[in-house]
Amino acid sequence: MNNQGKKSFWSNSAVQSITASLLCILLGLLIGYIVLLAINPAGATNAIVTILKNYLTYPSPKAALKYCGNTLVKTSPLLMCALSIQFCYKAGLFNIGAAGQYTVGAGACLYAALAWKLPWFVCLLLACVAGAVWAAAVGFLKAYRNVNEVISGIMLNWIGLYLVNMLLTGVKEGTSPYTEQISSINPAGMLPVFTPLSGPMSNKYVTIAIPLAVIVAIAIWVVLNKTVFGYEIRATGLNMNAARYSGMKEKKNVVMTLIIGGAMAGAGAAFLYLSGFEQWSVTQSSVPGMGFNGIAATFLGGLDPIGTIFSSYFIQHITSGGAYLDKMIYPSQIADLITSIIIYLCGFVLFFKLFLNKRISARRQAQTQANANDTKGGGQA
Amino acid sequence: MTLLIQYTLLFAAVLMLVALGGCFSEHSGVINLGLEGVMVMGSLGGALTMKYLPAGTPAVLMVLLVVLISMASGALYTVLLGVASINFKADQTLVGTAMNMLAAAAATVLVKAINLAENPDNVSSAIQYGTAKKAFIINIGNFQFNWFVPIAIVLLIASYVILYRTRFGLRLMACGEHPQAADSVGISVFKMRWAGVLISGMLGGLGGIVYITAGVSEWKFETGVAGFGFLALAVMIFGQWKPQRIALAALLFGFFRALSNVYSGFAMLAALKLPGTIYNMMPYIISLVVLAFTSQNSKAPKAEGIPYDKGSR
């Protein structure tokens, strides 16, 4: 009886996903630890603990809570990017362009807030529109011109970066490469603070972005699992020809999916930049990593919106933790290294699940065989 | 003008090498989206070789070693792709993306660690190779002739011959078109795909070192290779997976990339007073336009991207 209970436990797909993700994390951390050991064995253990502790390195609970807020502030855009990639992945599209959609979202909301002095909700909306337009280009090229969405996505990432740098040069501080502070130029452009959290955390950057991102995650779960549109998206992702054959407008669905995904990535950028936590540097020469880390979060979250909430937090937790490393000994990019190893390992998850299911069904077969033999034996006696 | 030709040739050589790499991998049936990461790893291997070889090394030896080590590091890095996508049937897009991120992070960490070990105040991610680079350059009057260009041309001819005139090449392409049929006549699909992936690693790695030595004498590994691996894939698609066409496509893209380096030297272009950003965006915009018009009748290998499963015969 006990054996049977165990069997059904492992064949549960949620259990398999969580186990696989935990294994990816463990292996990723292990490899990261080995790299730390190779660089400087003396402080390696301390360093990996620092990455894992993140804000908990602060001894006073008040400070820890405040910096926990900072991690949350950066988790919300990451979650939005992860959801964007996930939503598109369900339709069979690898939205690596989320990084570029995030970039143009940042450009749109910052320009609207600083140059036009618009209120925050208009800036947020414009960020969504910018992201959606950027993604729509990928969608049209994919659906109607058969262009691989990964290549067009990357091209648009770079075009977006150059455009945004050019656009935001008009609203940067006189002497620094950073955009002006929204709080001093246009206070109405700031996202409202989320008082239930920002008060106890005494962190003014904790805005409504955090609950909003979680709500979006739940909404995406509902859309994917409980609506006709979600069903069509998943069907298109599983087999585009079958979807077309059964009367779904698969081209329209491809474009729509990307537009929604792009809007989410754009909103993610607004969630960060309208909180005033960061300013855009107009001299930056690479596309922000948020969109790429989103890939890690979405696959680590087992391609499930709710799971992605937790995985996004984890990825951001170690990324922020990496910043606390002693820069004189260890490069902070160790955290990026761990994240990318985790993504790589996520590639093996499908194989892992197949392997597990094969083992389970083989064992079950052996057991039924044994049971059948037993009853046969019993009958004879 | 000579400067423009010089840069066009160099960037065309980069794009052609990397695109040929992609070509080998895709003809064997594996999409190598990790070429960007392969370039980073190849350039890292080459740059470290240039850094550590003693100053008096003869030019020929220097060129040879840098080329070989770049190719070897690229090939070594593609083992990650081979294991995951051939042996474990992983999602090739996901693995390629992971490889690009991993290469950038790993190269930055490694170079920073080396710099820190040499000098605790040096937290940069740059490697200098200004003096070593001179081994690659022969000055003919005003024109700087770079050894990488003839090497690339030789490899182009070799790729053509291997793909279309040898048993190995034809078998490789069979595995990308119809692996089941190839298997049924006794070709090992796994071996062929591994060969395709490793060759793409060598060519991609060589492309990486050519790229970072093209205009500058130090490279910050934090910046990666700015989407060049993907531009090369666009070149490959524009070239319809055929070496001779890839070479022409690479020249076109190389020209636009070179313009962004030297546009200010042309009175006519400088008079237009366009911001430099426009020239930086040019290769990416051109590639989008080109892809929009050439992807429809794509001659892509039919079985690319699909893991081979012996059971599906």
Image (cartoon, rainbow, N blue to C red):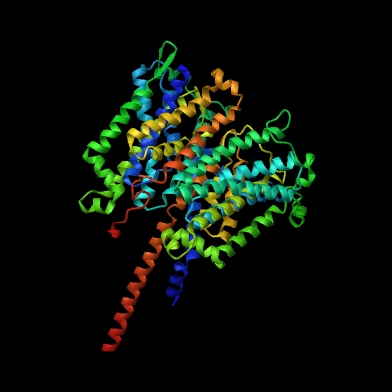
Residue A101 falls left or right of residue A23? right
Q: Pick whichever, B121 or B17, lies toward us.
A: B17
Residue at 41% in and 49% down? B92
Residue A249 visible to an observer of this rendering: yes
Write the residue at 47% across / 17% down: B1
How many marks are shown on the rendered structure? 0
List x then y, in percent, for residue A7: 43, 71
Instruction: Give the percent coordinates (x, y) of residue A372.
Output: 31, 80
Q: Give above or below for B144 relative to A303.
A: above
Q: Picture quarter containing residue B68?
A: top left
Residue B217: percent from the left, percent from the top? Answer: 49, 22
Instruction: Using the rendered view, name the quadrant where residue B250 is placed.
Output: top left
Does A336 sit above or below residue A240? above
Q: Which residue is pictured at 60% across the width and 27% down the height?
A: B274
Residue sitting nearer the eye, A285 or A206: A285
Residue at the far left: name it: B185
Where is the C terminus of chain B found, in terms of image quarters? bottom left
Left or right, B209 with reference to B126: left
Which one is in front, A233 or B105? Answer: A233
Residue A1, given in percent of the width and then of the height, sits at 44, 78
Report whether residue B75 is seen. Answer: no
